[in-house]
Image: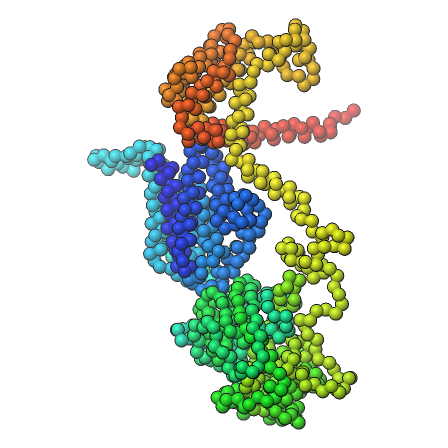
Amino acid sequence: MSGGIRLAVCAAAATLAAAGALLPLVDRSVWIVQAAFLLAIQTAVGVLARRVPLARALTVAVQALVALLLLTVVFARAHAIGGLLPGPDVFQEFGQLLREGASDVGRYAIPAPTTTAIRLLLVGGVLVIGLVVDALAVTYRSAAPAGLPLLALYSVAAGLAEGTDWLWFLAAAAGYLLLLLAEGRDRLAQWGRVFGGGGARPGPAAHPLGPGQASAIAPVRTGRRIGALALGIALLVPAVLPTMDSGLLQAHGQSPGEGGTGGGTGAVSPLVALQDSLRQPENREVLRYRTSTQNTGDLYLRIVTLDQFDGSTWRTSPGRPVTAVPDPLPTPAGLAPGVRTDPVNTSVAASGSYAQTYLPLPYPAEQVRIGGRWRYEPEGRMVVGGHAQTTRGARYQVTSLLVEPTAAQLAAAPAPPQRLLREYTKVPGSVPAVVAQTARKVTAGAANPYQQAVKLQEWFAVDGGFRYDTEVRSGSGPDAIARFLQAKEGFCVHFSFAMAAMARTLGIPARVAVGFTPGTPQADGSMSVGSKDAHAWPELYFEGAGWTRFEPTPSRGTPPEYTVAETPAGSDPGAPSARPDRSAAPSAPARPGDDCTPQLKKVDGCPALAQQPGGGRADDGPPSGTVTAVVVAALVVLLLPVLPMLWRRRVRARRLRPASAAVVQSSGPGQGAAAAGRPGAPAVLPDDDPRETVERTLAAWRELTDSAWDYGILPDDAQTPRRAAARIVRIGALEGPSAESAVRVATAVEQALYAPAPRPAGALAAEVESVRAGLRAAAGRGARLRAVLAPRSAARVAWACSRRWSAALERLRTGRIVAVWRRAGGALRPSRQRG
């Protein structure tokens, strides 16, 4: 195995060894087999490109292009042109997968499920790191700095896993050291093996090795030092990587489910976080969902329930047991078969910026399908995240019930169970007496708890003169509710807290729910829930219907139908009307396209814009510039592999073209000179001009040697033409006319170079074609394909570019351009002579 191939294999092995640290992050390890296969292809392409040889930068570019094609075939084949070539749809798909992958990283706990997005991050990351390591260690022959990308790969894995097994660290370190040793062995092999003598130890002035050998060992020593430094950093970096915090309504203290399998829910204080969300100037989207029900006004998304009232605020009771999420969830408490329920299917997608340990769900949920470490709290029917599990970028499906009790059923509800009465009607003695007195005053004349609840809701929302204001200070202490009842201004937390407390003073089991209102309908049929949709509402218990939502906050949310079903027909027409449904359609018809966002237009999600009044489509497809760019990019990708073949054919045709004098031989004396004198006409030389004879002969010889190079016979400029021809005949196994043609071309070259009066070249093009035919006949099928599709002599293009670049740099260094510029500036300056 040659040194370059050995180095490339070691670079790939080191990359895979470092990638092994990523295995504990996901639940399935099949991805690393796929990554190893694609990395092997990428490495093989680099080996072939260096053997051509291609320029270093071009070698890296070819490997990157192959990696892109491989990722396209594996992850975005359905969006590719012809199933292989990447176009705009492929890059759009990659962007979407990368965003989903970033969301999945924050969404799932370790080990995360191997989703397509996470698999793209893993496989693509290994290919990128492998490309960088291969470029540094093999293409640019500098293995020591290649430890930095390997360190980055291991550190990311260790940081996400909050520390990883030391065996993976040893594997990554061993791969890096193996790469250093392979690079050092390759360098020393260029100087030969060094044997130490048994004589006296050399003094400081004498080095046992020559200067070349000493310089060859120096990179190995430097690489070992850098390796030791990189391994030390790898131990320290994971310890200082930052961790992610949760967002809105983060639990204080121990996170839900943390600290054991039994776990418990932490205490939540939502007041400040909810008010901050409502005060934000921008309504930042936190959720988007699609649902099967048309009655979205009642589809509140509940996050958490607050069931402990201490006289000043509400919070979740600490120590509630949590279990694995059952499938399906238990039957809701208190729900009787006689109450109408409609099943609802909802698909929810959380924003990548929304991190919450409680899962927003319609109530009551029957089944939740979500990946990750989630737990179930039965009392509040809440789904809570385990250690480091949040809703960031979560996608899940929920089957829930839309409970629709009638007013008559709620009015006739029997008494709740004693356990619920004891727990959910507790009112501390610190609550001011005015709270209970106001509750009895407002509900005077009510015949049952249901009518009492309806009167409380109407008093807060319509009749009591309350005003909705998010700028009101939340307040604290036992007198907070009494102050709110006196000031009559606040936001949803004040209204829900006060109504739940007053319901408890009346003996009605009550608690507070925190979550989101249904949100805003979008043109594509989905519902968008923003930060300003954060809301709190009271839930009151009625046997037969279970926990039932009420809406006391004015100008917010939607009052349930069962709370307004018994409104008297002869009510005062001058009384304030109930709040409009925020989910209802606008009264004024919107112009077509006003509600269609640019994002929806990109995905053709605006059916109203599909047909314009004039009969034409609003969107006739992508712009012409985009189409042109795509076509040009596709042509470039298609032509790139065949460029060497096209260049080779053009060069061969130019070298073997007929003599220019033949064009005008039939013109007669004097006519050729006249033709040559016309503007744009080629210079014409007589057929026996020695200059043209030499040029044609040397061009034919260059074509012969390049043709032999294409079939694997490297040119040797140190040999005479006759010996070079004999070498081509011997290595190429030429026989008969092909071998004789090679000798005749070599003889013509010697005549052209050394004879005082070279004879006309004759049919050299036919001689060269005879040699090419012999080389093609003696070669195998693979060599013939290689000579046509990827000719080795195409390396002359890279050499020519390199020479021109070096010449340009030399001109800059010697100051020729600067001197020309100064002379030009001096000529333009006005003369200082005085007349």
Q: Quadrant of residue 144?
A: top left
Task: Pick the quarter of the image with the C terminus.
Answer: top right
- Foreground: 429 or 391? 391
> x%, y% of residue 390?
50, 67
Residue 731 appears in the picture as rendered? yes
| Residue at image location 65% in from the left, 64% down from the top | 522
> x%, y% of residue 709?
44, 25
| Residue at image location 52% in from the left, 60% down from the top | 103
- Foreground: 126 or 549? 549
- Foreground: 457 or 470? 457
> x%, y% of residue 22?
41, 56
| Residue at image location 46% in from the left, 54% down from the top | 119
| Residue at image location 53% in from the left, 78% down from the top | 305
Left or right relative to 631: residue 245 = left
> x%, y% of residue 384?
48, 72
The vertical placement of 825 against 377, above or below, is above
- Foreground: 759 or 411? 411
Q: How many marks?
A: 0
